[in-house]
Image (cartoon, rainbow, N blue to C red):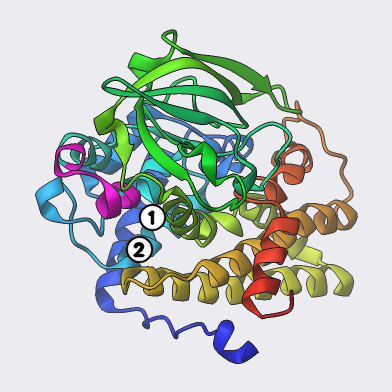
Amino acid sequence: MLQQALDFTAPPPPSAGTENLRAEVRDFLASELAERTSQQRAASWSGRDRAFSRKMGERGWIGMTWPKRYGGHERSALERYVVLEEMLAAGAPVGFHWVADRQSGPNLLRYGTEEQRESILPRIVAGECSFCIGMSEPDSGSDLAAVRTRAQRVQGGWLVNGTKVWTSGAHEADYMILFCRTDTKSDADRHAGASQFLVDLDKARGHGMTVRPIIDMRGDHHFNEVAIEDLFLPDDAVLGREGEGWKQVTGELAFERSGPDRFLSAFTLLAEAVQALAPDASERAAIALGRLTSHIMVLRRLSRSVAGMLQAGDDPALQAALVKDLGNVLEQETAEVIRLLVDVEPEDDATEDLPAVLAHLVMAAPSFSLRGGTREILRGMIARGLGLR
């Protein structure tokens, strides 16, 4: 039973095509990121740069697996994976298009209307369209079934009231996929009566939606609190089928939780530590760095397996939760292990690369096991999938 529940299919081996693509991406990044500091690279996929996203779109590196009729390129999941991991390993500022490419676009492909697909997907592929995720709420943590934002049916559409929190990019994104309750009679079943809506943020902000910044420990603004008061959404804003929001949102989370972004957020720090310690690394340092590297290799194989399962149309929600949980443990451990290995203190304003990158990761690491679902929620999912609760 346990073996079947945790089955990971073997990912396809690298091909000449994927390795040529990898070399092409590395050449592109060597030029484009030449002026970026190590601390800027440490921001990984949270760094947002519209111009960089447009350049990726011009290269055909967004929407890589999507149908050509929507602007996609119909390439393989493994080719897309190559681009993702090279971008993350190099610390490229991919945050502007990241959510749209990773999950919102695939969600539209599965559940969107033809009009929604034709209007939005080509803009994502071009690196011109950004999405944010309207899931988390105050006082509910990662328990999406506790959603209290409600959409009430009115003439011609819906009236929405509620609050979303930790909404990355809501202050500048073009669209939000909003998860809320549409059936107040389904309170007895926490997973019933929910729906998803496609919200045009240019129309919503200031017209029933107020976006307030949440400044993180580093003083950066990427989180937001989104207050929604009598926001009108037309009938055609419903994404998928009314009342099937829980099924849709859990499927979306498989895209969010399984990628290399869930174990490469601290990769810049590991690379800097290897460079600093390699000339005369002690046995203790060599063992610690080797252990971290071996864990990345295992997680990479598991993550590539999930990518193949998604391409095959499977629903690897359990496997994705496992990859994210293990990946977050590794990312947080990386910051702590390296802090003990190197003879430097974290210093945000340091001119040297290692203390500056270390300062960034020490402050960012607590969020790794929160974003995309806390480890308590993930482990509860895994336990249920294994029949242990």
Q: Is residue 318 visible?
A: yes
Residue at the front extreme of this rendering: 185
Q: Quadrant of residue 270?
A: bottom right
Q: Magenta stretch?
A: 106-117
Q: Quadrant of the C terminus?
A: bottom right
Asked if labels 1 and 2 touch by Cβ distance under 8 angstroms, the answer is yes
Residue at the left extreme of this rendering: 69
Residue plotted at (16% across, 56% down): 67
Q: Quadrant of the N terminus?
A: bottom right
Residue 318 in the image, given as x and y percentages of width and height: 56, 70
- Residue type at tag 2: Arg
| Mark 2 nearby-residue class (10 Å; few <14, some 14–19, many ≥20) | some
* Disc 1: which residue: 26
Residue 89 in the image, given as x and y percentages of width and height: 52, 55
- In the image, residue 304 above or below residue 158: below
- From the viewer's perspective, is 293 left or right of 246? right
Q: Secondary structure at mark 2?
A: helix
* Disc 2: which residue: 22
